[in-house]
Image (tube, helix red, strand yellow):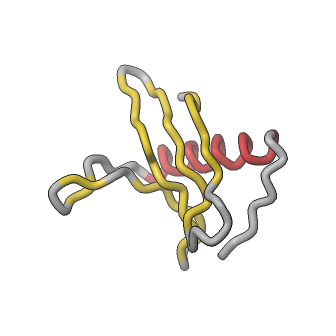
Amino acid sequence: MKILSLRPAPPGSGKLVARLDVQMDGLRLYNLSLKQTGCGLRVFAPSAFGSAVATFTHETSAALIALAMGELDRNGTNYQAA
């Protein structure tokens, strides 16, 4: 699993921390949202026709969050929970 692109959220984006594109075995996912929720950080896939186009297991979500936060840290992005 690797991050193809990570775009920190601009100031004033509410609970959105960043948008990211990732590559996993056999697939690429674009415009995932990393958000601060009442339960901590979560990754959300875009929606189509009112439903999520993908969901993630706890393990996959944790790996995506770790990758994204590591990339934000390497880029010197100052993340603060909303």
Is residue 69 left or right of 29 when viewed as pictured?
Answer: right
What is the count of numbered marks?
0
Q: Residue at x 57, y 73 (%)?
A: 14
Q: Position of residue 24 (x, y in %)?
A: 45, 27
Say above or below: 25 vs 47: above
Say above or below: 21 vs 58: above
Say above or below: 15 vs 68: below
Front-lying residue, 14 or 42: 14
When asked about the image quadrant of residue 50, the answer is bottom left
Q: Position of residue 72 (x, y in %)?
A: 73, 46
Say above or below: 4 vs 81: above
Q: Residue furthest top?
A: 26
Q: Residue at x 75, y 61 (%)?
A: 79
Is residue 77 left or right of 16 when viewed as pictured?
Answer: right
When asked about the image quadrant of residue 75, the answer is top right
Is residue 12 left or right of 75 when viewed as pictured?
Answer: left
Q: Position of residue 13 (x, y in %)?
A: 58, 68
Q: Position of residue 26 (x, y in %)?
A: 36, 20
Which quadrant does the C terminus fall into?
bottom right
Q: Residue furthest left?
A: 49
Is residue 36 left or right of 57 when viewed as pictured?
Answer: right
